[in-house]
Image (cartoon, rainbow, N blue to C red):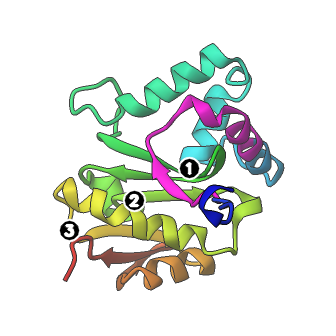
Amino acid sequence: MAGGGAARHTEAVPQLIAPDVRVHASFLGAMAEFAAEGRGSMADNSMVGRDLRLWSRRWQHPAVFARYVAAQLAETEPDGPRAAGFVPCTNLWWVEGDAFLGRIAVRHRLNDFLREFGGHIGYDMRPSARRRGHATAMLRAALPAIAALGIDPALITCDTTNTASRKVIEACGGAFEDERGDKLRYWVPTAPG
């Protein structure tokens, strides 16, 4: 090598991105993992559950996946089309290179349901990426974007039985407020200091 320098190998570093068609294959793999663990039933009202029901039979086609990505991006629009009871939402994907690891949804405001049960933030980590610190890193990385939306602190809820999610929230500074039904409610500061 010229100058005697050593060749460098750069590894992809996990990062938040806007939804992007470039991770199509990996996204489909992640959704297959979610489906294999039983997600997508009519009882599953999570982001993943709804998306699996609405898109999973079609999004393997690139044009349909591009429409799905466009729909994810359009959810940020204050006056955009959305189902009754839904609020504007910024969707961000946690990726490592072209590998889709998880996603986080930031709801721009709280309605009655979100104030009680859903909170400002929802997230999912694909099963094969769990227990490696990705959920905590993803939430920490999202905090500046959440603050930029004027949300400080952010309400995050989790099921009383979801110890992993509770630990993620607490690791990111979540202050426990109360338990309502089967949900724990935390307030997480988003702005520094």
CA distance for labels 2 and 1: 12 Å
Give the alpha-carbon distance from disc 2 to disc 3, as whole Å.
12 Å
Q: Quadrant of residue 70?
A: top left
- Viewer-side label of 2, 1: 2
Circle number at residue 191: none
Going 46% across and 84% down the picture, which residue do you hit?
171
The part of the chain drawn in magenta is 11-31
Indicate the quadrant containing the C terminus: top left, top right, bottom left or bottom right.
Answer: bottom left
Inspect the image, locate mark 3, and give the three-letter code of the amino acid beneath it.
Answer: Asp
Nearer-N-terminus badge (2/1): 1
**Is 76 within the magenta?**
no
Residue under label 3, please give it. Answer: 152
- Which of these two is toward me, 162 or 167? 167
Q: Secondary structure at mark 2?
A: strand
Quarter of the rendering containing residue 76:
top left
Q: Which comes sooner in the sequence, label 1 or label 3?
A: 1
Secondary structure beneath disc 1?
loop
Question: Of the numbered discs in the image, which one, if any, rests on residue 121?
Answer: 2
Residue at image position (16%, 58%) is 150
Q: Residue at x 70, y 20 (%)?
A: 58
Callouts 2 and 3 close, C-beta under 8 Å: no
